[in-house]
Amino acid sequence: MLLPRGPPPLKEFLDIWDVDVLKRPQDINKQAHHTHLYSSDFLIVRRAQEFQIKITFDRPYKPAEDKFAVEFVIGPSPQYSKGTYIPVFPTEERQSVWRGRIVETSDNVITMGITTSPECIVGKYMIYVSVVTPYGIRRTRREPKSDIYILFNPWSPADPVFLDDEEEREECIMNELGIIYHGTYDDVSERAWNYGQFEFGVLDACLFIMDKADMPLSNRGDVIKVTRVASAMLNSRDDDGVLVGNWSGDYTYGVPPTSWTGSVEILLDYAGSRGTPVCYAQCWVYAAVFNTFLRCLGIPGRVVTNFFSAHDNDGNLKMDIILDENGKLDRNRTKDSIWNYHCWNECFMARSDLPPGFGGWQVVDATPQETSDGMFRCGPASVAAVKHGQICYPFDAPFVFAEVNSDVIFYRRQKDGTLEAVKVNQTHVGRMVLTKAVLHDGRRDITDHYKFPEGSPEERRVLEKAEEFGCQREKASVPQGDVEVEIPNLDVRVGDNFDVTLQFKNNSDQRRSADVYITGTVVYYTGVPSAEVLFKTPKVKLDPLVKYDVLVRGEDYMHKLVEQANIHFIATGKIKETGQIITAMKVISMHNPKLIVKVTGSPRVSEEMYVSVEFTNPFKFSLENVDLRMEGPGIMPFKRKQYSIIAPGTSITWIETFSPRRAGSTKLIASLDCAALRQVYGETELTIQQ
């Protein structure tokens, strides 16, 4: 067979035999870039920091004669001007936006150091090596195994996400285990969560979220734009995002929000289905999955819980509660809601678009409450700006300000329909803001990051500043009455009978008597009422101090409870002698039974171990279609088991085997869920040896 004449073999020119991107977890790159925990067969590095690759040529490299470049390409149509095609040269004389240098030469092998720019696109790059020959440029073939991921870098002062605190970085980037706070501010509950940002497939799922949003590649190096797009994409309201919100109590077509134990299953389901939203979520699920997204891409992130969080529909800093002329609650006219708690995220970044002092922690919230620029999203809003009332700055600071600063106003509705303010509670909303402590399981109160102490001169100045930017407050001065009422906290298990106590205090030296209305309503944690379980109208004669007890029976509320087992008690009334309106509110969170999680076996990498989950049904009724879930980062993938029925007083034990993949301290987290009993958790800590 005749062959056409071609050029002679290119022996005098460089030929590339091998490109090694040093991607093993123990190699220099992943160790130096804090990416050794990612379960990935690819090189993962952080921007604005040098990484190394080894290139093997067919002969020793001659710097004076040989010209070559390492090329990085991202996206379908790479262009140098858009930062999607970047050549990196080994000599000082020729440099592009990324810098290259020869670190070491040994026979035919050179080690090259490459430093990416601090604002480069975050994502997955293809890598080529090209050599200049007299016959044109000779380029290596596409080799998918050499692709590299470039992430944000909180360790580099040049990167806008730089966080200058080693322990805070360890917590907000490297920790896979979280604690999410819920319940009420005077009876805080907590649950563990597996963020799983290093688990196999999670990084690709996080990048897929930006693809699904059609986010331009050129914007993916800007942390403000990335977090804003993610805030919209983590809910499915207007863009087929990750999670479908559901606060109805009916979860027939998906997983109840209280059942999830971690983010991994959710993100892998979403990416695996090429963008079918996952059912279902409520605020802490949105916040937890958003936190996985942030930490996975290298943005410092934490989940924050605001107790008594105002959902202010009209931005007027007022939660309006309407009473009739006798002081009885008018449910039909009371529209604003106060969530028992609400979870959002904080992420850490410089804000070059704002004046100095407003960088640092920023609120981002994926729970779809109100629209922002036409989409359901919130943030990033500067926490410092919220604290100082500077709510003119982007993004969505007035909404966050109202969540922590609104007043609760009780209005009496007169016969002619006019409203008269009869009581103002300025301290109920934003009572406490919590996040997990750094590097241990305690809680950290960060309320002072969001507001100055109640009643302080600084707080008054901040509220005046917020009013300059359009927030309206109730100006009516309500005279101080001489009778007070409060409802003390209670520790109640689900199903128990208990007494709700009203404590009256008569501060006058005269007899007082009151017509009182006490309502107990099962509420969702969002403050939305479900069913009334108590209504009493006692007449109380007030000596200086009086206690009035109301019995609440288990059989009256058990079949009406919704998932978080909250009953909201409101006591209102009118003092006969003075016409003063008295009010008190208390949310009682019932405590659910716990799961017992035990581990046996030798806690070593790759050795078989056993975990058992035990539960006893303490109720007088059967639990049906019970769903059990369990997982542990680095040691055990997500597992699930279902029981059709657990009879009253009977116990179940679920045993699974697992082999830890890596050493270190971790947890196994389990949940139990069924229609009659939600929010049942258990966990155990263990330390795996190498």
Image (cartoon, grey):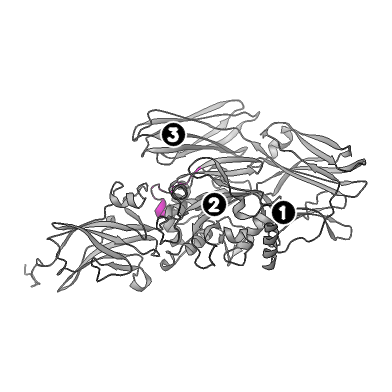
Give the x, y percent position of residue 118: 39, 63
Q: Mark 3: few, some, or many residues within 10 Å (few <14, many ≥20)? A: few
Is 217 on the left or on the right of 408, as rendered?
A: left
Residue located at (62% from left, 64% from top) = 390
- Residue type highlighted by circle 3: Leu
Residue located at (54% from left, 67% from top) = 355
**Residue under circle 1?**
455
**Residue under circle 3?**
686
Tell whether position 203 is magenta. yes
**Residue under circle 2?**
286
- Residue 566 is tagged as none
Q: Is residue 194 above or below residue 375?
A: above
Please tell me whether mark 1 sits on a helix, a strand or a loop: loop
Please tell me whether mark 3 sits on a helix, a strand or a loop: strand
Mark 3 vs 2, N-terminal side: 2
Task: Check whether the beta carbons of the residues at disc 1 and disc 3 lie within 8 A of each other.
Answer: no
Q: Is residue 281 visible?
A: no
- Residue type highlighted by circle 2: Tyr
Closer to the observer: label 1 or label 2? Answer: 1
Q: Quadrant of the C terminus?
A: top left
- Residue type highlighted by circle 1: Gly
Give the x, y percent position of residue 37: 37, 46
Q: Quadrant of the N terminus?
A: bottom left
Marks counted in the figure total 3
Closer to the observer: label 1 or label 3? Answer: 1
Please tell me whether mark 2 sits on a helix, a strand or a loop: helix
- Dividing the picture into quarters, in which one does residue 115 lie? bottom left
- Dividing the picture into quarters, in which one does residue 333 lie? bottom right
